[in-house]
Amino acid sequence: MGSLRLVAIALVVAAPAFAQTYGLGRTPTADEVRALDISISPTGEELPVGRGTAKEGAQLFRSKGCIGCHGAEGKGGGPAPRLQSQKGPEVDIWERGRILPLTAPYATTVWDYLNRAMPVGAEGSLKPDEVYALTAYLLFLNKVIPEDQVLDKQSLPKVKMPIGDDYGRLPEWKPGTPRLTGYPY
């Protein structure tokens, strides 16, 4: 009990030090927060206006230097992950490799990742039309969409991804029962 009282006194005495500011940083402006608020949901409500096809994406894949990291047609060979599976749709999805355009639960996830993280060194620099085109190209390479399909704000969220319902399927669970078979808690 005495040590608890000592901790309480120490906190009261030290409280002003916790409230102290150090003059570092600043509060971001509303425009700065808005610029970073780029999350795209599965419904695609936040997607910008734009459009793209796989043919346009193939040209961008070459001109933006994606081949340097991901190899020709995304088949690998560079320092970055492969983007095209070597195995066909007859093989279980998880046996085709950790390929984003195959294992993403939603096509909007692919778009969101490309928009945020590519190209390396100039992340976030792609225009919406370029992101739609590159997304279409990667989905086409993995036989998710046909080559002539146009992706835009309306069509992208409707793309049926190969992973289907196998992505993060939750087990049935009721309060007071074990969470997983064989799990004791």
Image: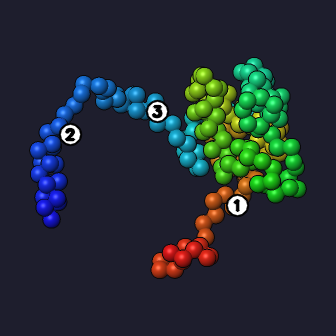
Apparent side of residue 29 relative to residue 5 in the rendered image (left or right): right
Look at the numbered disc 1 and give the secondary structure of its residue.
helix
Query: In 3D space, how far apart are the residues under numbered discs 1 and 2 (Cα atoms)?
Result: 47 Å
> Is the N terminus in the top left, top right, bottom left or bottom right quadrant?
bottom left
Which amino acid type is marked by label 3?
Leu
Look at the numbered disc 3 and give the secondary structure of its residue.
helix
Query: In 3D space, how far apart are the residues under numbered discs 3 and 1 (Cα atoms)?
Result: 31 Å
Query: In 3D space, how far apart are the residues under numbered discs 3 and 2 (Cα atoms)?
Result: 29 Å
Location of residue 167 in the rendering, given as x and y in whole percent from the top left corner: 67, 57
Q: Which residue is mark 3?
A: 36
User: What residue is drawn where x is 66% and y is 41%?
Assistant: 110
User: What residue is drawn where x is 73% and y is 55%?
Assistant: 163
State which mark lies toward you, 3 or 1. Answer: 1
Q: Earlier in the sequence, mark 3 or mark 1?
A: 3
Location of residue 166 in the rendering, given as x and y in whole percent from the top left corner: 70, 60
Which amino acid type is marked by label 2?
Phe
- As drawn, which residue projects farthest toward the top? 63
Depth check, front residue: 66 or 59: 66
For label 1, count other residues whose C-alpha is less than 10 Å away and answer few (under 14), some (14-19) or many (20+). Answer: few
User: What residue is drawn where x is 72% and y is 58%?
Assistant: 164
Q: Which residue is mark 2?
A: 18
